Each structure stands twice: as C-alpha cells, then as structure tokens.
Amino acid sequence: MGFQVGSALLDACVLSVLQREDAYGYVLTQTLRETLGVSESTLYPVLKRLKRDGFLTTYDQAYQGRNRRYYTITGRGMQQAEIYRRDWRVYRDNVDKLVCSGGGA
Amino acid sequence: MNRKEFLGQLEAQLSQIPPEERADAMAWYNEYFDEAGPENEAKVIAELGSPVRVAARIKADAAVRGLGEAGTEPGPRPRARKGIGVFWTVVLVILALPVALPIFLGLFSLFLGIVVTLLAVIVSLVVAVAAAFLCGLVALAGGVSALFVHVPTGVFYLGAGFVAIGVSLLLALLAILLSRALAAGVTGLFGLMRRGGKAAFRRGVNGGGAYE
C-alpha cells in the first residue's frame, strides 16, 4: 500500500480489533497485516506502548504446551478507541473531500 | 538462516537494552515463530528481515521510552559521550602535532645523542685497553730478546711490559664496570621515557573524555 500508516491509526486499529475480542500476538499481527500491510516488528512496539499507557493489558494462557500472550483492552482503552473513532471519521471525511472530489464521483 | 540463528542474533543485538525489555521482545518473537509453525519458519524469517534491523527498531523504541521517562538517563547517552571524548582526543592530537612533533623529534635526537656518546666512550676505552695490552706484549717480547744482549735493558723492558699489561687489565675492568652502568642508565632512561609518554597519553585521553 502506498499510504504510510501513522502511529495514531495503528493504535486505533489495534484497540478496535481488541474491542471485538481478546487476541494473541500472531492473530493480531495477521489481522492488521491483511488490512494495513504492517509487519510484526512494527506491531511489537505499538503493543508495548499501548500497554504502558494503560490502554490494554496482557495475560498468558498455555496452549499445546507453550505460552500464548493474550492482549485485552481496558476501560481506558475503550474510551481511547472511541476518541480515535470520532477523530477518524472527521479525518476520513476531510480526506474524502480532497481525494475523491477530483474523480467525478 | 533458521529460527534459532535468527533469535540468537537478535538477542545478541539487544544486549544493550534492559534485561526485562529484552526478555519481552524475545518472548514476542519466540511466540510468533511458535504460532506460525515450523512449516512457516522460512517465510517468517523472510518477512522479518535481518535481525539487525528488527533489533534497531526495538532499541529505538526503548531509547525513546527512556527519553520520555523523567529522571532516567537514556541508555545510549554515556556511550555517545565516550565517542565524543575519543573524537576530541583525535582533534587535539592533530592540532598539537605542529608543536608536539618538533618536541618529540628533539627529545628523540637528544636521546640518540646520549646513546651515541656513551657508545663512543665505551669504544674508545676498549681501544685504549687493547693498545695498552699490545704495548705490554711487545715490550715483554723485546725484553726477553734484550736479556741475551744486555741484562739490565731486558729487565727494564720486561718490567715495562708487565706494567703496561697490568694497566690494560685495570682499564678493562673499568671499561666493563662503566659500560654496565651506562647500559643500566640507558635502559632506565628509555623506560622512563616510555612510561612518561604512556602516562601523558592516558592523561590526554582522560582529559579529552572530560570534554563534551
């Protein structure tokens, strides 16, 4: 994809995915990679930062003799996700006006 | 490269960040490999790219976090300061060269002069010893042959020969003692210069390190 994904958009996506259900790193990465084209090494610092800011927490669960670290959204995270959604709609509409006005649609 | 090599290199690259950060990152990548499964190992490695780049990202993140936390010194700063110290040392050495080089050359010439003079003294002593010894031998030979012609003359030459040989032996003793003392002196002087030079260099580096 030709568009750079900024950290705010990444945060918004991660929090929104986690709002649907808890996820472990691999699934989270695959989901975001399909949509945004980001790699696991991009996501790792993002998750760390969100955890430090108190927007998500982790818990470990054994799976087939190994460990899976699940990420789960907190109350603060949900508030933040709501803020991101509001900001995103405004931003998306503004970009739409600029980018799509040239096409004739 | 396989998974083990990748994780090994990554861990080595992360040796500078705090242990808990490193353990966290290693756990993330270990889990990622686990979830992807052994059949996807090569694919994951290809996606991740080089361990150096992955590590650079984690380190950059850790450094930014270090800057954000109040009162904590970010990790890479002290190393940067050391680098500046070495840099300034090099600059100082270059700037000091026009002054230091003549002084160094002068000191070296002085040292060389002292050594050559001392060597000359020793050589001249050896020559003097050899000459006196040779004189003594010639006088002895002359004395022995003169004994058959005129006894007092022969005895005189024999005596003179013995005196000359005795003097040469005394001189040889003196020469040996003197050259030993000189060798010790030169070695001591050389050691002193070397130690002095090293100490000055160390002072220079530390002094440079205080710069920032």
Image: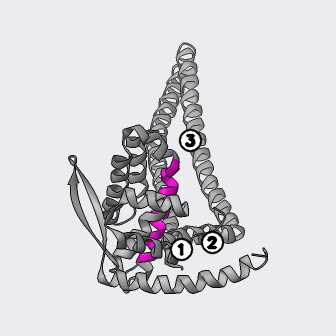
Residue B208: numbered disc:
1
Q: Which residues are magenta?
A: B47-65
The amino acid type found where label 3 is placed reads Leu
The reply, left or right, for residue A63 in relation to residue B175 is left
Please name whichever residue, B21 or B159, is drawn nearer the observer in this view of the structure.
Answer: B21
x, y percent for residue B145:
56, 15
Query: Could you give the CA–CA distance between mark 1 and mark 2, rounded to whole angstroms?
Result: 8 Å
Task: Tell which circle, 3 or 2, labels the residue nearer the N-terminal end.
Answer: 2
Q: Residue at x 43, y 70 (%)?
A: A14
The amino acid type found where label 1 is placed reads Gly
Tell me if I can see residue B25 in this picture.
yes
Residue corresponding to mark 2? B92
In this view, B11 is above or below B76 = above
The reply, left or right, for residue B56 in relation to residue A70 is right
Query: Mark 3 packing: few (<14 Cα in 10 Å), some, or many (20+)?
Result: many
Residue B151: numbered disc:
none
Residue corresponding to mark 3? B125
